Image (tube, grey):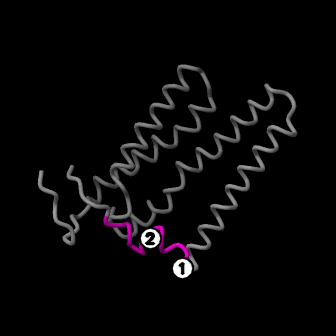
Amino acid sequence: MELRPQAHANDPECGQRPVPALSHHGSQRVVLLQTATLLGVLLLGYGYFWLLVPDPEGRLQQLGLFCSVFTISMYLSPLADLAKVVQTKSTQCLSYPLTIATLLTSASWCLYGFQLRDPYIMVSNFPGIITSFIRFWLFWKYPQEQDRNYRLLQT
């Protein structure tokens, strides 16, 4: 595998733009609003667990469920891009290094949760393994084409 710049950083089809463009586009304001809303949900959850759940054991169980939901949603969020990959038959929107990192991280957490016998850790990280294998299959089925706008770095 060769190293090259991510071709999808400025690709509007992939829905990604560099950070300075956030204030200039209405669609990015929507993304910022969604992010702020999720941050608000996170803060409300924090307040709920520390102020309204007095039992430490119950708090720990509910907090594990809360964190599991967020972790599962993180691993399932790329599914929208996967549908676009199948539709366009191009993996330019996917990051191969991120797929490897996701597989290694989620598998490590699953093994750690298995050792602790903690279902919150195992179950919430298992979708990361599944989505990584789906992305590997897509990379195999639709290989990335080298972007001719970039020269390869000489080593």
Please name the residue shown 28% across and 52% down the image: 140
Residue 58, horizontal then vertical, whole percent: 80, 29
Residue 58, placed above or below residue 17: above
Q: Residue furthest left?
A: 154
Q: Nearer the viewer, residue 135 or 2?
A: 2
**Mark nearer the N terminus (2 vs 1):** 2
Count of marks, rendered view: 2
Q: Which mark is residue 17?
A: 2
Label 2 is placed on what type of residue? Arg
**Residue at the disc numbered 1:** 25
The reply to whether the magenta stretch includes residue 14 is: yes
Please identify the quarter of the rendering in which residue 36 is found: bottom right
- Give the residue drawn at x 40%, y 37%: 104
Vertical placement of residue 83 versus 135, above or below: below
- Are the residues tagged 2 and 1 within 8 Å (C-beta)? yes
Which x, y percent locates residue 76? Answer: 54, 51
Mark-to-mark CA distance, 2 and 1: 10 Å
Q: Is residue 10 left or right of residue 121?
A: left
Lateral position of residue 132 relative to residue 74, left or right: left
Badge 2 density bin: few <14, some 14–19, many ≥20, Cα 10 Å: some
| Residue range highlighted in magenta | 7-24
